[in-house]
Amino acid sequence: MRRVVITGAGTINPLGENVPATFEAMREGRCGIGPLEIADVDRLAIQIGGQIRGYDEALHFNRQQIALYDRFTQFTLLAAREAIAQSGLSFSGALADQSGVVLGTSGGGLTTQDENYRAVYEAGKNRVHPFIVPKLMNNAAASHVSMEWNLRGPSFTVATACASSNHAMGQAFNMVRCGMAKVMVTGGSEAMLCFGGIKAWEGLRVMSKDACRPFSATRNGMVQGEGAGVFVFEEYEHAAARGADILCEVVGFAMSSDAADIVMPSKQGAARAIGGALKDAGLAGDSVGYINAHGTGTAANDKTECAAVADVFGAHADQLMISSTKSMHGHLIGGTGAVELLACIMALRDGVVAPTIGYEVPDPECALDVVPNVARDAKVDVALSNAFAFGGLNAVLALRAI
Amino acid sequence: MNTQKKVVEIIAEQAMLEPADVKLEHTLQDLGIDSMALVESIFAIEECFDISVPFNANEPGESDFDISSVAAIVAAVDRLKAEQGK
C-alpha cells in the first residue's frame, strides 16, 4: 500500500475564485450567500443562494470553448488549473498514462439542460445547438480536464448526489494507494443555480428562505451553492522524490449505505462511514481534532450527524471541533465535499479552523463544539470530512498533517 | 369546491385508506403520514385548490399552516383560499 498526499488544490466558489481567497473568507467567517441573480427568480419561493458573483465566462474561455463547456465544466477547469499549477506537475510519457481524473457532480450540465428545455418548450424552437449532448453530460468536466492536461489513465465521473465529491476523492485515493495510478486529479463541481435546479429543490420544502444556520436551534433549512474544488492526489514517494510541496496526507476513506430511506438520514449509516474512515486510516478516535461536517442546516441532518459523531467518538466528541462551512458557501451538492476539503487543509496546514457562521441559539441535539461564528487557531493533526447523500450514501475522508 | 371532502381525499390517498376511514379528529401520526407523505399532501393541496401553502419541513411548528389534525388542515386551507382569493 502506497501513501497518498495532496500536492495541489484549486477552487472557485462563492467565497473566492481561488484557494487563497477562499481561505481568507473562511478565516474571516464571510458569507457568500445572497440574493440570486438568475432568470425568472421572481417565480421562485427560494431566492437566495451561494452564487459566484461577477463571474464572466468570456474572461476565462474563448467562444469555441464556451460552446462546449457548461458552467460546471468551466468551474472544474478553473479549479483544476490552479491545482495542477500548484502541484508543478506536467503530464507526458509514462506519467500521463499512469495519471487520471475522477470527479464528482450531481447535476452535471444542468444549466445547459435548463436553457435548452426553455428553447424548445418555452420559446418553441425546433433546433438546438449541435453540442448540447457533449456539453451537458456528467462526464464532460472529467473529460475536458483529461484533454487539457493529457491525463491518459483511469478517468470517470461519480454521481452520488451530495456525496459525489467525497466518493470521487475516495476512489482517487484508493487508486493511488493500490498502485493503479501515480497521480489522480480529483474533486467535484456543481452549477445548479438555474431556475429548474432551484425549483426542484424548492419542492422538497427543506430550503431556507433566509440563511443556512447549521447546528443552530434556529436553523430552517439548506441553501444551495455552486462552484468547484479540485485536488492533485499523488503517490507520496513520487511527490517526495521531486521535492513537491505537500499540503497534507490522505490517510483513510470509508463509505456506507443506510439502506433505509431515500431522503431521511440514518445515524448508524453515518457512524459506520465515520468509524470506517478512522479504521481505514488506522487512527484512534482521539487523534481527530477537526471534522468538516456535512452540516446542511436541515433539522434532520444536523441532529443525526451530531448523534453519529457522539456515537463514534464517545467522550472525545466533546473535545474535537466540528464546523459546517456550508453556512458560508452554501451546499454545493455534488461539488460540496471538494470545497469543504479546503477547510480541512486549512486546519491541518495553517492551524485555522473555519467557523460555522450564522450560529444563533444552541440546540441540545447538536451539543458539540461547532466553532460558532468565529474561526479559531488550533493545532490539528487529523481532520475528517463528512458527506451524507440523499439515497443514504455516505462517504468520509480522513486527512493528516505532514 | 368542498374543502373538507377534497382534503380528506388527498390525505386518504397518502395514508392508503378509504376517505370514510379518515376522521376529522385524526392527527397525521394517527394516519401513519410521515414527513414525505406530508410534503406530498401539501403539494396535492396546492395543486387542487390553486393556493400556495407556507410550509417548511425543517420547522413544521413554525409554519403558518396548522397540521395538528385533519380538521385543522381543512380550516387552514379554507383560510388560505379566502386570503388568496380562490
Image (cartoon, coloured by chain):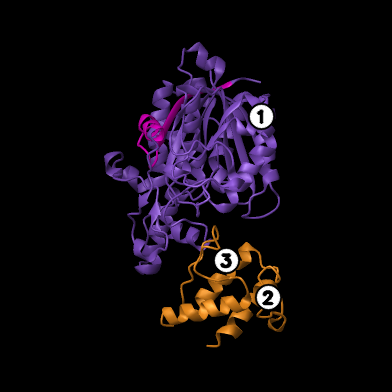
What label does residue B26 carry, if any?
A: 2
Amino acid type of disc 3?
Val
Magenta includes A211?
A: no
Which of B69 and A362 lies nearest the eye of the viewer? Answer: A362
Give the crowd class for mark 3: few <14, some 14-19, many >=20 residues within 10 Å: some
Q: Is residue A24 above or below residue B6?
A: above
Badge 1 vs badge 3, beta-carbon distance below 8 Å: no
In the displayed orientation, state which residue is furthest to the bottom. B1
Lower sequence index among marks 2 and 3: 2
Amino acid type of disc 2?
His
Q: Is residue A249 above or below residue A321?
A: above
Q: Colour of chain A?
A: purple
Magenta residues span A4-27
Q: Tell me the CA gap for discs 1 and 2.
A: 47 Å
Chain shown in orange: B
- Label 2: chain letter: B
- Label 3: chain letter: B
Badge 2 vs badge 3, beta-carbon distance below 8 Å: no
Would you say A179 lies left or right of A120 here?
right
For mark 1, what is the residue?
Answer: A278
What label does residue A311 carry, if any?
A: none
For mark 3, what is the residue?
Answer: B39
Q: Tell me the CA gap for discs 1 and 3.
A: 37 Å
Query: Dot 1: what SS?
Result: helix
